[in-house]
Amino acid sequence: MSQAIMSTDQDTINPVQWRNNALELLDQRLLPGEETWLRLEDVEVTAGAITDMVVRGAPAIGVTAAYGVVLAARDRYSADPDTWKTAIQADLDTLNQARPTAVNLRWAVARMAKLMSGIDGDPVPVLLAEARRIHDEDIAACRHMGELGAAYIDADAGVLTHCNAGALATAGYGTALGVIRSAWSKGKALTVFADETRPWLQGARLTAWELLHDGIPVQLLADGAAAYLMQKGKVQWVVVGADRVAANGDVANKIGTYGLAVAARHHGVRFMVVAPTSTIDMQAASGAEIPIEQRDPDELFLAGGKRVAAEGAGAWNPVFDITPAALVDVLVTERGALDSPNAASIGNLMGI
Amino acid sequence: MSQAIMSTDQDTINPVQWRNNALELLDQRLLPGEETWLRLEDVEVTAGAITDMVVRGAPAIGVTAAYGVVLAARDRYSADPDTWKTAIQADLDTLNQARPTAVNLRWAVARMAKLMSGIDGDPVPVLLAEARRIHDEDIAACRHMGELGAAYIDADAGVLTHCNAGALATAGYGTALGVIRSAWSKGKALTVFADETRPWLQGARLTAWELLHDGIPVQLLADGAAAYLMQKGKVQWVVVGADRVAANGDVANKIGTYGLAVAARHHGVRFMVVAPTSTIDMQAASGAEIPIEQRDPDELFLAGGKRVAAEGAGAWNPVFDITPAALVDVLVTERGALDSPNAASIGNLMGI
């Protein structure tokens, strides 16, 4: 099985793969206990896999959605070659609505849709090539961001990350974990800490699994312990990914990111966000315009699949939060790193 | 069983009871799923129950230890009425070492020990009376602190609490939850939020159970969501207990408390610590002198009893942290409430 999770051309985990005319996803709900691949042959199950978090992480969701468009086009074209471009609109909506916060989803669907008007005949070859391009570009972006971000970090630094912004959250290599991987590959002996990241435990389950897969030691901590970790001087950097970055640099990311940013500023710990430009939403002027997903209270009521909360309790379960740009020291994208990102520097980066 | 957890004279949960010549503890490891009482007949099992968190919460640990001294004295006196005062020293050490951070443990053992020199004959009646006095004083202190703390809180406030500083953490009624109970009983319609409080989930398991038992609605949140809750303006107060308060007002409390204090200050949310004077350690000049317990990494590796973390991960699992006095807006004790507590005001309160 470990062979299966490696992309063929490089030694990185690749959780999203097009194989034998279908999309295959490593089921992230079952990691690290089980490495199970799901084979998705139509767009409905692809959207469902995004909603149910078989795949998660903004860039990985984008790549998955791109392949989902290929599956949709194949079925719609096969059903009626004359009307598929109209019929597929419902599928694009279904994909777009699979999850609300990560903008890469809509970005990838829009990029795929843009190609469709010029297609004559079978759309699959053209769309599959574009999905593969999105996929490859994401890996290349992660590797370049890894280099750019790693340059900021001293060789003996302590680094804290949150959730999973790794190979599993992207098409491979990772955003925040790409920075850690890159620094590590350059011989920087970072001390890596990972928040366990309740409620879904991406840190304990996915980030630890990924880093250990690459031979990078990692220490887990309760999310509530992060501020004390900073008070004890154990970390100099917080490095996280993003699900959406607004035009002014406000960052939507996994719940808990904002508290880390507040604590980091309080302690003089630097705060780095690593995200490809596909995560930047120039339509959202600020974080206030980014929709924040609320998920099932059972994510809080259960732990390890077992009911832990008292019966009758309510829950407040937003799974993302907004970190104001003012708390971000560096925004690393594949087009460059911005110190103290703001509307002007992001507009410039995006060529607007 | 619900009858059993009520003290006879008032409608509060009382997790520590002396019944039929032994100590009975409500096993807090099994709540809220099971309400099981353990009967403890000697000091070794009593110390073990403290270490294993059958009972937890600084005041409850203190009351338990006081009864543990009674059990020790009974056995030592029965074994040899002439040498029991010497022999019991080993038992006092065992109790004192059961957990390191909550100072109420040592406070209660020292208070019991102080009586022993004057005892002639069977020590049990004298020591049991003193243990009951400690027990009753704790409940009275909680009720008085509840009144004092509730006076600070507006009728329509949102209140966030962390861990369990309730009846289960005391001899009954609670410190932080005593404030919430008192405000509620005065008709203040607080909106109560409780951090789930990883790794032991005291918030989800115990605080929610307790508040719902009293008919007070509560919403759980992931610990990482607290800063975002404040950003959204949903709470005006954070109210927590303490495991030890240093002479300068620094507070040791459940891991995550410090991050809440940092976030509260950032948002102008007020931060209240509720603790009886038995929690104040005048021997510790500052928080730097308070020992912080590190517990088994399995507390992080497991959730709901199931392994969730990737194999091979390390863990950093301090279960308390230190909040500097400068971040505490109010310290409520049974002798009065101190705004912006500091060494001078605490010294004055303690009569030094």
Image: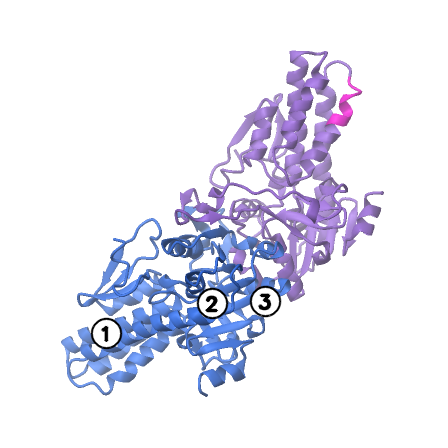
Chain colours: A purple, B blue
Q: Marks 1 and 3: same chain? A: no
Q: Chain of mark 2?
A: B
| Disc 1 from disc 3: Cα separation | 41 Å
Question: Is residue A114 shown in magenta?
Answer: yes
| Disc 2 from disc 1: Cα separation | 35 Å
Name the spot of residue B199 as percent of width and height, x first: 45, 55
Camera-side residue: A284 or B256?
A284
Looking at the rendering, the stretch of residues picked out in magenta corresponds to A113-119
Residue appearing at x 49%, y 69% in the figure: B151
| Amino acid type for the residue under numbered disc 2 | Ala
Between discs 2 and 1, the one toward the N terminus: 1
Question: What secondary structure is found at the residue carrying circle 1?
Answer: helix
Q: Which mark is residue A102?
A: none
Query: Which residue is denoted by mark 2 in the rendering?
Result: B150
Q: Nearer the viewer, mark 3 or mark 2?
A: 2
Camera-side residue: B302 or A14?
B302
Q: Marks 3 and 2: same chain? A: no
Query: Which residue is denoted by mark 3 in the rendering?
Result: A231
Name the spot of residue B211 as percent of width and height, x first: 40, 56
Q: Marks 2 and 1: same chain? A: yes
Label tally: 3
Q: Chain of mark 3?
A: A
Q: Is residue B341 above or below residue A9?
A: below
Query: Which residue is denoted by mark 1 in the rendering?
Result: B70
| Amino acid type for the residue under numbered disc 1 | Val
Camera-side residue: A72 or B337?
B337
Q: Is residue A153 above or below residue A21?
A: below
Residue appearing at x 36%, y 63% in the figure: B167
Observer able to see residue A160: no
